[in-house]
Structures are given as structure tokens and as C-alpha cells.
Image: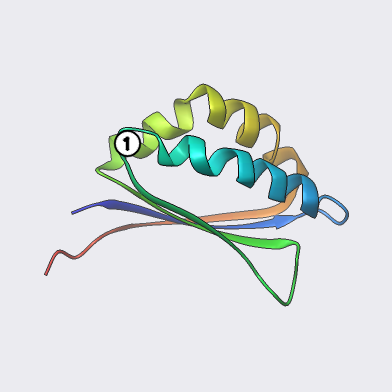
Amino acid sequence: MAFVVAAIWKAKPGEEERIARAIEVMTPLSRAEDKCLFYQAHRTPDDPRTFFLYEQYVDESGYEEHMASPHFQEHVREGAIPYLEDRERAFYHTMDL
């Protein structure tokens, strides 16, 4: 059973390319984390300010370690969140059937 994060980020007007760059930097760094199973960013075709992030970690501690990482602090906490108009997160566990 994996820990899943589904996040929707909406950039402030004029900040969408800043957010896209932050995500481009974060993707390979996140995928390289030991407890990251899957990390995929998406951009809404109808609204270039809206991004969807789908992440899977081996467990919740993997996500906590992700958020505590230096790259998360630099590129998300400092480099992206201040430039977001809205940020939603939902958490799930996979159903291993």
C-alpha cells in the first residue's frame, strides 16, 4: 500500500512560467528520492495557470521526508508556494487488490 498525494496548484496571474520551472526542477529531484515511487506533473490545457501533481511514496514518512528535503524547501516552499493563488492537496492509500 503506497501513500498518494494529489495536488492542484494554481499560479497567480503572470507567475505560471515560474511555477512550471519550479516543477521542472523538482521532478527529477523528487523521482530520485529513495521513498518516491512515482512523481508526475501535469498542466491543464484549458488553463496554463493550473497544474496537477500526482505523487506516490512507499509510506507517509516518504512524503514527510520529501517535504523536509532541501530541494523541496528551496523550490517549493520558497520558489513556488508564494507565487500560487491556490493550492489543494488530497491524500490517499493505494488499494492493492
Spot occupied by residue 74 in the image (x, y as percentages of width and height): 63, 26
The local secondary structure at tag 1 comes to helix
Question: Nearest the camera: 27 or 48?
Answer: 27
Residue at figure coordinates x 30%, y 41% from the top left: 60
Category of crowding for the residue at label 1, using alpha-carbon neighbours closer than 10 angstroms: few (below 14), some (14–19), many (at least 20): some
Give the image quarter of residue 78: top right
79 or 85, which is in the foreground? 79
Could you tell me which residue is drawn at 46 percent across and 38 percent down? 30
Q: Position of residue 14 (x, y in %)?
A: 88, 54
Question: Quick check: 95 left or right of 42?
Answer: left
Q: Residue placed farthest to the bottom in the image?
A: 46
**What residue sits right under mark 1 in the picture?**
62
At 43% from the left edge and 33% from the top edge, which residue is drawn?
66
Q: Residue 79's spot in the image, x, y percent? A: 71, 34
Q: Is residue 97 above or below residue 16?
A: below
Q: Left or right: where does residue 9 sit relative to residue 35?
A: right
Quadrant containing the C terminus in the rendered view: bottom left
Task: Indicate the position of residue 96 as horizontal and vertical percent values.
Answer: 14, 64
